[in-house]
Image (cartoon, rainbow, N blue to C red):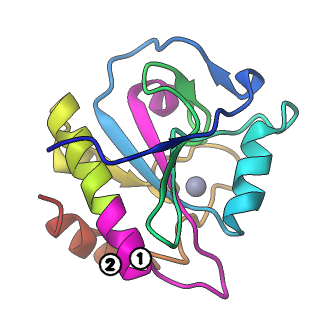
Amino acid sequence: MSRPDVKWIPASPQNQNDYRDLAIDSIVCHNTDGSLQAAIAQFQDPEAQVSAHYIVARDGTCIQMVLEAHTAWHAGDRTMNHRSIGIEHVADKNNLGMTPEQQQCSLNLIGYLVDKYKIQKSHIYTHRTVDTMAGGTDCPKWIWPDEVSFEKFKETIA
Ligand SMILES: [Zn+2]
């Protein structure tokens, strides 16, 4: 599968490692819980200590903010950060689920990454299932309220 068109908007170098300790074998899916502009601003804020490789906007635009060869800080788990690509999807309590354009872009991007890195479908995760920080997270509940809905989405990946 070919690489989807992406718009490059770099995250702050302070919010990532410019290397990986592990080979890429996983994808972690997120929702932004806020607007696209807020997510971009957060990843560009050198104090934020958070980033993701990609953001899929509600109009179907795919934005890349961290190089795949770099470690983005999104999973709430150091090991998972080093072995995964993090994909944010713009959604919040007033914008539930994905738009059709957004879903198409997400499927194209995930299909491309699965093909490129030979990622097993069992290694495509929701943030909440990999986070090991105190308190955990319910991300990405605005798109996938439970793992059953996420498994259904995964069935549509080429
Ligand atoms: Zn998340």
Query: Quarter of the image containing the N terminus?
Result: top left
* Rendered position, 114 above or below 146: above
Q: Position of residue 11 (x, y in %)?
A: 68, 34
Q: Is residue 141 left or right of residue 93?
A: left
Q: Position of residue 49 (x, y in %)?
A: 77, 34
Quarter where residue 38 is shown: bottom right
Say the numbered circle drawn on residue 53.
Answer: none
Q: Position of residue 61 (x, y in %)?
A: 47, 60
* Rendered position, 9 above or below 38: above
Which residue of the protein is positioned furthest toward the right in this rendering?
A: 47
**Residue in front for this viewpoint, 128 or 98:** 98
Distance, label 2 to label 1, CA atoms, is: 6 Å
Q: Is residue 1 left or right of residue 35?
A: left
Q: Is-magenta flag for residue 103?
A: yes
* Rendered position, 33 above or below 8: below
Query: Quarter of the image containing the C terminus?
Result: bottom left
Q: Quadrant of ligand 1?
A: bottom right
Say the numbered circle drawn on residue 149.
Answer: 2
Q: Residue at x 55, y 47 (%)?
A: 131
Disc 2, SS: helix
Q: Residue at x 15, y 38 (%)?
A: 115
Q: Residue at x 64, y 55 (%)?
A: 136
Q: Kindly check if marks 2 and 1 are in contact, taking CB atoms under 8 A apart as contact.
A: yes
Disc 1, SS: loop
Q: Position of residue 4 (x, y in %)?
A: 31, 48
How crowded pointer 2 is (Cα within 10 Å; few <14, some 14-19, many 20+) is rated as few
Whether label 1 lies within 8 Å of ligand 1 gets the answer: no
Amino acid type at mark 2: Ser
Q: Is-magenta flag for residue 15?
A: no
How crowded pointer 1 is (Cα within 10 Å; few <14, some 14-19, many 20+) is rated as some
Disc 1 target residue: 146
Q: Which residues are magenta?
A: 79-105
